[in-house]
Image: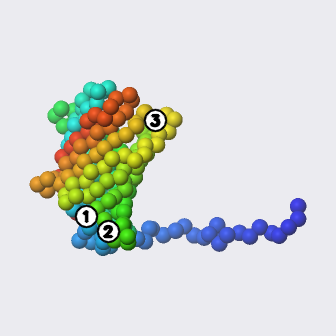
């Protein structure tokens, strides 16, 4: 075998990286300034926790608790994380339930902030969703533009979500068309701000 010796990249033998040096915040009083393109989403930034109910034509109804985090690092998107757990009728936790993460991205128009957003969400059930929507006052309306599924995921064809802040609480409703059913109510909850 002939040729030049293989050059070793400098990072191959570098020491471990330090802790991530950039701050992410769900509290607007600390950390980086919120990107101006996200001003319409400012009221949503924070940590929200509460309870909700789920239903669908193919399943039995259920109750759940949930925590949702909207945080940012100064760039024109919010990081979104949602964790839910099933509850008994008396509120005792049963087990972890649905979880999803993603990004809420501002969509500028002609270089200026607009009320349009793109929301990218993924979950461990093998489903990725791209929502398009608008921010109107304290309300966000989202409709799927695309749904991508792994070969083992359940069939989900479309979804829509409505988020709104009412009397200081975050309320939402989630509908979906899945497993041969038309667009039908699936989840709704009321979450109270616990941080931010």
The residue sitting at 85% across, 67% down in the picture is 3
Q: In the image, which is nearer the foreground, mark 1 or mark 3?
A: 1
SS state under label 2: loop
Residue 159 in picture, x, y percent from top left: 34, 41
Q: Are marks 1 and 2 in contact (CB under 8 Å)?
A: yes
- Quarter of the figure with residue 113: bottom left
Circles 3 and 2 in contact, beta carbons < 8 Å: no
Res. 194 visible in picture = no
Disc 1: which residue? 40
User: From where the camera sits, is residue 151 visible?
Assistant: yes
Q: Secondary structure at mark 1?
A: helix
Estimate the x, y position of residue 150 in percent, counting from the top left. Answer: 50, 39
Coordinates of residue 105 in the picture (x, y in percent): 37, 60
The answer to whether residue 113 is above or below residue 145 is below
**102 sits left or right of 50 in the view:** right
Q: Residues within 10 Å of mark 2 (few under 14, many from 20)?
A: some
SS for dot 3:
loop
What residue does disc 3 label? 153
Q: Nearer the viewer, mark 1 or mark 2?
A: 2
Instruction: Report which residue position mark 2 lands on.
Output: 113
Q: How crowded is the residue under tag 1: few (<14 C-alpha within 10 Å), some, or many (20+)?
A: many
């Amino acid at each position: 075998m002939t040729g030049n010796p293989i050059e070793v990249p400098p990072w191959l033998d570098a020491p471990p990286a330090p802790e991530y040096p950039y701050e992410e915040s769900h509290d607007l009083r600390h950390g980086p300034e919120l990107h101006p393109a996200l001003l319409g989403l400012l009221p949503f930034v924070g940590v929200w926790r509460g309870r909700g109910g789920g239903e669908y034509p193919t399943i039995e109804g259920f109750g759940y608790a949930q925590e949702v985090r909207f945080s940012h690092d100064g760039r024109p998107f919010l990081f979104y994380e949602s964790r839910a757990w099933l509850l008994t009728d008396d509120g005792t936790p049963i087990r972890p339930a649905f979880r999803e993460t993603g990004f809420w991205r501002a969509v500028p128009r002609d270089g200026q902030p607009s009320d349009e957003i793109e929301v990218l969400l993924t979950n461990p059930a093998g489903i990725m969703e791209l929502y398009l929507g608008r921010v109107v006052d304290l309300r966000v309306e989202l409709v799927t533009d695309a749904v991508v599924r792994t070969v083992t995921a359940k069939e989900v064809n479309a979804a829509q979500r409505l988020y709104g802040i009412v009397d200081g609480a975050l309320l939402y409703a989630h509908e979906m068309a899945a497993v041969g059913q038309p667009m039908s109510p699936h989840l709704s909850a009321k979450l109270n701000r616990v941080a931010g």
